[in-house]
Each structure stands twice: as structure tokens, then as C-alpha cells.
Image: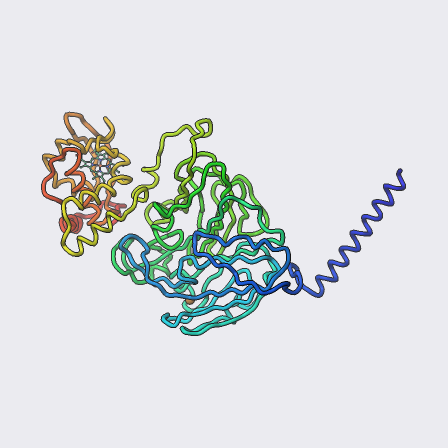
């Protein structure tokens, strides 16, 4: 018995040594991850636009995979009523998702659309070779470049343009993700989504309307106007929110294109079961917030337990609420009161993202054409009131006794309606009496809202809940008051 065990161990050791020397021999001739020449007929890679992810390759052998990626310079909305000229891989920000299998030989075709103004190239972080392909892919408008690489390492990899000025090409949206599946593939899940963060630099302020040019100085100073998921404020909210049902497994491929910021990626009200941090092969478990460096990516998995709107943010939180870094996963299904009791806090979290800003932008169009009606102003103001003023004054304008004075039926507001302009711009503190009740609290300045927004909000407030407002507030009135008032320390301009 003893001898048989000994001999078995010996055999096993011999076999191991044998395998190791085989592996060494193999390593000498081909690099790790190389599984030999491609097998079968060439395959055209399925490319998808965000937030979609191509289906698994379902392959157990290396293949030749052809990727056709076209660079397009497109003007699109970055926020409601704000346009921006994005430079894109495949027409979207982030660019098309590429999915291959470890060991695949990828024949890459980069096309630069003839209508484009700029030359471009591509640096794929999943490629071992000079510039990650950039050295072989410089492509003028109306031209095409081709190069071939072997996907030696599994993982989730960023790709981006690396044409000078590199920061400007990336800052205009030229990045995306490539997944190199492990040989055995990834475990099946119910949903796979593609989300990528980026920081944007416009000459105009946050949400300033019209076509906004790129601001090189802000980019150099690393002071973004927008921090966004999937290239626009509306990309993943409202009707575009990601969806799942209760009890489903969700896998996110999350990248960060930068060009400057590191993301503290967090899903409010969820915990990641697993995170392949830095896009590598190791998994961390039970993660609240994961760091995604600029030019990096992670795979994050979680399962849904209770219904609701789960908000994805960069937890550098001003970026979420004041620069746009906010996306929503809507989970539907029956409540589980044992896990979570209820009481929705959506409106406070989502602010004006909770509903469509379409009504607001409609108003902006009318403002431009000088055809704004009172009714339109009230509607737009109402959408903005919810999530800004409603946090304290409540959505029905009733306030909270002893803490936040009511705006509905406020005798103070009725007596001095025009004073509200000063209140919203500069805030208010000290004792005051509304409808016979006293308050002695602090309202912060709301001057981060622009002139149109404040005019519409005040018009809404003075024309709702039976308030018999005076005539509507105009942006010009707010603008004049803003210019005439010295800003309190720390307030937004
Ligand atoms: Cu480029």
C-alpha cells in the first residue's frame, strides 16, 4: 500500500515534470496565450454600439477575426440643447465594442470616413506591438489602414485614438473597449452592458446651450465641464436607462476613456459580487466602489434583489450631480420587504434626471424664437423644481413645518414675489415668518442654475398650488440681478 502510494506520487511528479518541460519547450517557440494558427474560415467580428455587448464567441479554438471599424466625426447632443462635435470609432461614444477570444488572430481595418477633417489612428491596449497598433494605423480622411495582431492576453481592454494632439482626440470621444475572452469563455449571465466614462471640456459652461467647441485650456487644467457615461447626459437615463428584472445577473464592462479623470465607479444601492479589477484576471468580491483609471477598465458583476432605480455614479460626487456622471439601471419585479423596506428616495437622488428634460429643451427652443408661453415656462420650471427645490420645499410646495417654509400659499412670497430672485441667487438665512409660523434656518444659494432655469422655476412656483403669481419671470431679469449682486463666498457664479 505504501509502495503503491509512493510510486503513484513518483509517477505524478514525473508526469508534472514532463508537462512542465513541454510547456517550456512551447514557451520557447511561441509566447504565452498563443494557441497556434487560426482555425476554420475567417470570421467577421460583430461590433455593437453602447450599451450593447456582442454575443459570446462560443468558440473553443483560435480563429482569424476581421474587424472593420470606421472613424466618424459627428455632431450630437452632449446634453439637452447642447451640441458637440464628437470624434468617434463607429459613430458612437464610446466606440463600437469589439469581442474576440484569446489566441485569435485579428485582422484590423481602420477606415477614416472621407467627410472627416482629421487624421486618426488606434492604440489598442490589448495589442502587444508598437503603439498598440497606433504605429501601423495612421489614417487620413478617405483612407483605410490594415494591420494584424494576435490577442495573446485575455481581459477587458481600452482602445483609443493616439493621433496628435492625443488629449484632444480622446477628449472628443475617441475610445472604446475590446474584450478578449478567456479560452473557456465567460460564464453566461442575464445581461451584459457596456458603459464608459469620459470627461469633456467645452468653452461654454455646464448646460450652456448651442454648439460648444472643445476648450483646450480647460482640458490642460483638467477642469472638465462634463463628466459623462456613454458620451451624453441622456445616454443612460429616462427611456435609455439600462434594465433588468429581479433575480438576474448583470455583468458590466466599464471603461474609462479619460482623458484626465480617474473614476470611483459606484452603483447606488448595489454591491458588486465580483470585480475583475483593472480588467485583469483576479477577482475582488463584495465591492462597493471600484477605481477605474483613465485608460483602464473593469468587469463588474452583481445580481438584482429588489426593484427600483439604481443609479450609477462616479462617486467623486460633484461629477455625478453637477457634471452629468449619472446612469440608471431600472430593476423591475416584486418588492422583497425582508431585504429592503421601501420609501423611495429617487427624486432626491436623481434630481432632474428622473424625468425627461425634453419639456425643458422645448422651452429653450421657444425662448430662442421668442415664442415662450407662460404655460411652457410653468411646465419646464416644474420639471426643474423637482429634484432641486423639492428636496427641501417638497414637491407639493408645502415645506416642512419648522424647517423649510412653504412655497404653496406663502404670504411672504405673495407680498414680495420679486424678492424671490435674490433668494434663489444668494440664498437666505435668519429668522422669517411665513403664514404666521417662524423659521430660522439657512437656504443655500441656487446660483448654479442658469438664468433660464431660474426664471422658469420661479414662474412655476408663483403659478402653482393656487399661488396667484405676478407676470412670469424672465431670464433677463435673473441675469440683471445676478450681475448686480456680489456673489456670496463659495457660491457658483
Ligand atoms: Cu483621432
Q: Residue at x 81, y 48 (%)?
A: 12
How far from the left and from the top, in percent, is residue 62?
62, 60
Describe residue 251's horizontal placement relative to residue 231 as left or right: right
Inspect this view and state whether residue 208 appears. Answer: yes
Q: How many marks?
A: 0
Q: Residue at x 14, y 54 (%)?
A: 370
Residue 347: image quadrant is top left
Q: Residue at x 18, y 45 (%)?
A: 377
Inspect this view and state whether residue 315 appears. Answer: no
- Residue at the outermost front position: 41
Describe residue 477's horizontal placement relative to residue 130 as left or right: left
Q: Nearer the viewer, residue 443 or 301?
A: 301
Specify how the rendered protein is coloured: rainbow
Q: Nearer the viewer, residue 122 or 97?
A: 97
Where 320 falls versus 128 (above or below)? above
Residue 344: image quadrant is top left
Q: Nearer the viewer, residue 489 or 290?
A: 290
How far from the left and from the top, in percent, is residue 21?
77, 58
How far from the left and from the top, in percent, is residue 408?
18, 32
Q: Residue at x 38, y 61 (%)?
A: 172
How far from the left and from the top, in percent, is residue 1?
89, 38
Amino acid at each position: 500500500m505504501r509502495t503503491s502510494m509512493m510510486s503513484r506520487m513518483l509517477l505524478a511528479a514525473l508526469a508534472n515534470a514532463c508537462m512542465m518541460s513541454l510547456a517550456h519547450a512551447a514557451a520557447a517557440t511561441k509566447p504565452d496565450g498563443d494557441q497556434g494558427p487560426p482555425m476554420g474560415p475567417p470570421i467577421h467580428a460583430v461590433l455593437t454600439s453602447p450599451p450593447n455587448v456582442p454575443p459570446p464567441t462560443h468558440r473553443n479554438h483560435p480563429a482569424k477575426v476581421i474587424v472593420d471599424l470606421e472613424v466618424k466625426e459627428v455632431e450630437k447632443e452632449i446634453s439637452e440643447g447642447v451640441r458637440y462635435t464628437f470624434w468617434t470609432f463607429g459613430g458612437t461614444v464610446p466606440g463600437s465594442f469589439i469581442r474576440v477570444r484569446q489566441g485569435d488572430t485579428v485582422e484590423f481595418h481602420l477606415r477614416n470616413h472621407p467627410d472627416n477633417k482629421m487624421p486618426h489612428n488606434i492604440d489598442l491596449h490589448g495589442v502587444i506591438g508598437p503603439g498598440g497598433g497606433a504605429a501601423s494605423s495612421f489614417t487620413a480622411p478617405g483612407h483605410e489602414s490594415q494591420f494584424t495582431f494576435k490577442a495573446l492576453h485575455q481581459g477587458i481592454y481600452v482602445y483609443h485614438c493616439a493621433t496628435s494632439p492625443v488629449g484632444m482626440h480622446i477628449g472628443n470621444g475617441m475610445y472604446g473597449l475590446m474584450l478578449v475572452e478567456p479560452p473557456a469563455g465567460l460564464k453566461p449571465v442575464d445581461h451584459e452592458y457596456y458603459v464608459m466614462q469620459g470627461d469633456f471640456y467645452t468653452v461654454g459652461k455646464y448646460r450652456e446651450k448651442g454648439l460648444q467647441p472643445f476648450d483646450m485650456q480647460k482640458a490642460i487644467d483638467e477642469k472638465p465641464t462634463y463628466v459623462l457615461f456613454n458620451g451624453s447626459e441622456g445616454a443612460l437615463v429616462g427611456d435609455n436607462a439600462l434594465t433588468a428584472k429581479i433575480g438576474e445577473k448583470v455583468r458590466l464592462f466599464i471603461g474609462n476613456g479619460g482623458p484626465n479623470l480617474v473614476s470611483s465607479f459606484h452603483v447606488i444601492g448595489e454591491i458588486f459580487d465580483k470585480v475583475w479589477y483593472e480588467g485583469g484576471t483576479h477577482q475582488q468580491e463584495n465591492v462597493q466602489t471600484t477605481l477605474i483609471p483613465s485608460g483602464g477598465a473593469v468587469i463588474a458583476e452583481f445580481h438584482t434583489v429588489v426593484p427600483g432605480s439604481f443609479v450609477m455614479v462616479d462617486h467623486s460626487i460633484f461629477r455625478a450631480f453637477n457634471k452629468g456622471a449619472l446612469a440608471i439601471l431600472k430593476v423591475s419585479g416584486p418588492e422583497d420587504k425582508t431585504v429592503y423596506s421601501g420609501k423611495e428616495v429617487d427624486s432626491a437622488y436623481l434630481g432632474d434626471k428622473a424625468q425627461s428634460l425634453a419639456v425643458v429643451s422645448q422651452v429653450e427652443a421657444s425662448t430662442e424664437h421668442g415664442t415662450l408661453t407662460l404655460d411652457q415656462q410653468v411646465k419646464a420650471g416644474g420639471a426643474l423644481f423637482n429634484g432641486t427645490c423639492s428636496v427641501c420645499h417638497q414637491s407639493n410646495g408645502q415645506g416642512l413645518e419648522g424647517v423649510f417654509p412653504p412655497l404653496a400659499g406663502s404670504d411672504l412670497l405673495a407680498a414680495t414675489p420679486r424678492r424671490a430672485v435674490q433668494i434663489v441667487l444668494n440664498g437666505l438665512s435668519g429668522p422669517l415668518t411665513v403664514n404666521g409660523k417662524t423659521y430660522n434656518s439657512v437656504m443655500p444659494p441656487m446660483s448654479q442654475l442658469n438664468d433660464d432655469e431660474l426664471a422658469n422655476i420661479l414662474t412655476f412656483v408663483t403659478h402653482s398650488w393656487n399661488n396667484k403669481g405676478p407676470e412670469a419671470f424672465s431670464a433677463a431679469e435673473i441675469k440683471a440681478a445676478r450681475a448686480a449682486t456680489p456673489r456670496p463666498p463659495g457660491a457658483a457664479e
